[in-house]
Each structure stands twice: as C-alpha cells, then as structure tokens.
Amino acid sequence: MKHLVSIMVIFVLILALPTDSQAQLRKRTTSKTSKTNKEKASDDETRFLDKTYAELKFGNLGFFNGLYISSKLDVGYKVHDRFSFGGGTKLFFNQQVRQNAPDPSIFDIGGFVHARAKITNDIYFQAEYAFMKYGKDPDGYIYRGFSTAQNVNYPLFGLGYMSGTDKWRFGIELLYIANEKARDYQGSIVEYWFGASYNF
C-alpha cells in the first residue's frame, strides 16, 4: 500500500503542474492583460477538465452458493487523444451461504494505476498494476485459509469497449490477471467489469 500512496502522490503532482509554459510568464498588469489572464486561466481550467475522465464499474458477479460482487472507481488524464493514464480503487465482496449458520463474508480492497491506449474511438487496450489486500477468513470459517490478510501486487491487461456519443459512455472491460497467486485468491483468471465512463 506504501507503493500505491507514492504513485498516487506522483500522479497528483504531475496533474497539478501547468501544461502551458506561457502560464509561468509574468507581464505588467493592466486591465486588458488582467482580463486576458482571467480568460486564459479559465481556458486552461476548461482544457484540463476536458482531458480528465472518471469511471464507475461493477463486475465479477456470482450467485452460486453465495453472493460475489465487486466495484471499481477510477479517474484518469488524457495525455493525447489516444493515450491516457490514471488510477483508482477496487472493492470485492464475497458472501457464502451456510446451512443453519451465519453466512460469512469477506472484503478485499486495493488500488491500482493504469495506462490506456485507444485502438478505435470505442475499443481500447488497458494495462493495470493492482495493489490488493485480501481479507482474512472470518472467525470460525475456512474460506481461503488466511489467518491474516494477504497483500498481493500484480499486473493485469486486456481490452475494453465503450459505446455512446456524448460525454457519457457505457461499456465492458475484460482484464487478464497475470499473477497465479492473485488468480487463486480471486478464483478467476480474468476480471470483467460493466460500467459508465464520463468524458471517455
């Protein structure tokens, strides 16, 4: 998790730096230049917001012998029309059904950073690096055999599709988990997500 915090701090610093070298020049203040500077600052803010995007996704659903659901929230910055990078957080919830006993549940939580390349206006390739904390088994139950929480960092890569015309788009994402331990802990070789993207 320390690596995640470091990466997120670097990410915020990069986004906070001015993208236009003219923004650092100082000119003599007059009413005309003051008005121009205000317009320029407004344009810079608009340009920055036009290059950012936010996404909310749900996925990895399962209803066999319990409830399995996960969510993913991320934000990103477009460095080019076709390339972007960002980061976010993931939450996995697993609950098993037990006969004549309380139903145990486990939360897995973590963060990730990603890089994305658009192949077309709707299809993209995404590579992620996740920092996950897998929850320990509930007291009195054996689920994965964890007496303490387990931390696993692992890469993922895959494709996504977003459909829509305006700011809001909706689609699906399929990512291969490129780490055997993470695949074992999640009980799957892929993560799949359905959701919405703003300013894709």
Image (cartoon, grey):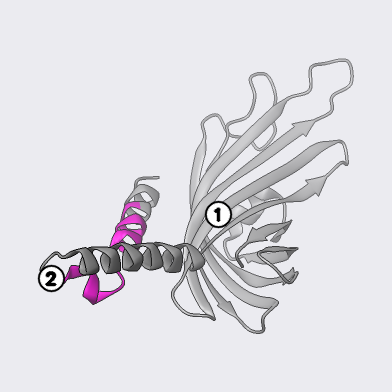
How far apart are the two marked residues, 2 and 1, measured between alpha carbons? 39 Å
* Residue neighbourhood size for the residue with mark 1, other residues' Cα within 10 Å, grouped as few (<14), some (14–19), many (≥20): some
- Is 78 left or right of 161, judged from the image as shown? left
- Is 67 left or right of 29, judged from the image as shown? right
Residue drawn at x 69%, y 45% as measured from the top left:
70
Q: Which residue is mark 2?
A: 27
- Which of the two residues, 25 or 15, is positioned nearer the viewer here? 25
Residue 74 numbered tag: 1
Task: Let me know if residue 128 is in the magenta part.
Answer: no
Residue 2, image x, y percentages = 34, 46
Q: Amino acid at mark 2?
A: Lys
The magenta segment: 9-25
Q: Main secondary structure of the magenta part?
A: helix
**Is residue 132 visible to us here?**
no
Residue drawn at x 35%, y 66% as measured from the top left:
39
Q: Secondary structure at mark 1?
A: strand
Task: Let me know if residue 10 is in the magenta part.
Answer: yes
Q: Amino acid at mark 1?
A: Asp
Residue 21, image x, y percentages = 23, 75
Q: Secondary structure at mark 2?
A: loop
- In the rendered image, the quadrant that contains the C terminus is bottom right
- Is 29 left or right of 17, judged from the image as shown? left
Residue drawn at x 65%, y 56% as measured from the top left:
183
Residue drawn at x 40%, y 45% as measured from the top left:
1
Q: Quadrant of residue 135?
A: top right
